[in-house]
Image: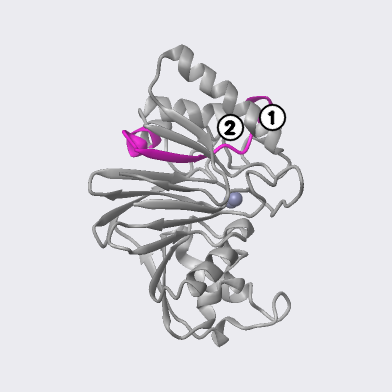
Amino acid sequence: MKVTFWGTRGSIPSPGQETIRYGGNTTCLEVELNDGTLIIIDAGTGIKKLGQHIVSNSRVGKINIFFTHSHWDHIQGFPLFAPAYLEEYDIEIFGCEPVFHNVQEILTNQMDARYFPVRFSNLKAKINFHEIRQEKLVLGDAVIDCIKNNHPGGANGFKITENGKTLVFITDNELHAPENSGSSWQEFVDFCRGADMLIHDSHYRADELENVTGWGHSSFEQAFELAIAARAKELLFFHHDPDRTDDEIDEIVKGFRKTIKKMGLDMKLDAAIEGTKYRIG
Ligand SMILES: [Zn+2]
Ligand SMILES: [Zn+2]
């Protein structure tokens, strides 16, 4: 499968000179399975460019969108997703219960006349909603699993396994949350075990955590600790703080790479960059 980052930023779009390299758009990932099946995870502002890319490449047919949850930075781009305006597209929207329960209503409401000029009911694509109730979902040759994150209001992480290769995407997750409404540390380790690529929320630095417990995000250190415990082959930091500059992220990545070397580990590490594409397997 191939993974492309269209939005890597957390909380709010953050364009500017200091964020230009890692990107300012909020969460949106494109995953292309080996048989060409298109999966999009989240509709943050990054989905706008992805939509234009899909339409300009005349890529027609089914588009599968998975939502981790419905916070602004994960849904805000949907009203500007070009394929939603064209009748030749089928858009299948997925999410795990109970977080997903109101997504149709939420996507409709964010296109209310008070917020946006076009109604959801005026979109021309065929749009269907699917709530994942069982633990696994089969799509093409891939199996998709959900895990419950620790996040205010709830959120889900996804694992996509195709031909023995696994991609784990967990954002908006506080690994050591004061109240475990989602999953335990051990459940996260088990879910991520042996992942070929683990993309995890790294919104904060360890020294910033003190005043933000319960806000639903993790630190670089905690994501790193998870990747080591799960023996992931590659870790990508994700959901960059809107105030985190490119230079700061560079320094953080450099520091963790040194630690990997010192520990004698064989793990790749990077921070997700908007516009980059990875092949897994
Ligand atoms: Zn977020
Ligand atoms: Zn969130």
41 is higher (above) or lower (below) than 131: above
Q: Residue at x 23, y 58 (%)?
A: 141
The one of 252 and 225 positioned closer to us in this rendering? 252
257 is higher (above) or lower (below) than 276: above
Disc 2 marks a residue whose amino acid type is: Ser
Q: Are marks 2 and 1 in contact (CB under 8 Å)?
A: yes
Mark number for residue 219?
A: 2
Mark 1 lies on residue: 208
Residue 214, percent from left and from top: 61, 39
What distance separates the C-alpha of mark 2 from that of mark 1?
A: 8 Å
Q: Residue at x 51, y 73 (%)?
A: 56
Neighbourhood count class around disc 1 (C-alpha, 10 Å): few under 14, some 14–19, many 20 upward: few
Position of the C terminus, as image quadrant, is top left
Disc 1 marks a residue whose amino acid type is: Glu
In this view, the residue farthest toward the right is 17
Q: Is mark 1 within 8 Å of ligand 1?
A: no
127 is higher (above) or lower (below) than 218: below
Q: Is residue 275 left or right of residue 242?
A: left
Which quarter of the picture shows residue 115?
Answer: bottom right
Q: Is residue 213 left or right of residue 35?
A: right
Mark number for residue 189?
A: none
40 is higher (above) or lower (below) than 123: above
Q: Is mark 2 within 8 Å of ligand 1?
A: no
The one of 77 and 216 positioned closer to us in this rendering? 77
- Is residue 205 in view from this perspective? no
Q: Which residues are magenta?
A: 188-209
Residue 238, percent from left and from top: 55, 42
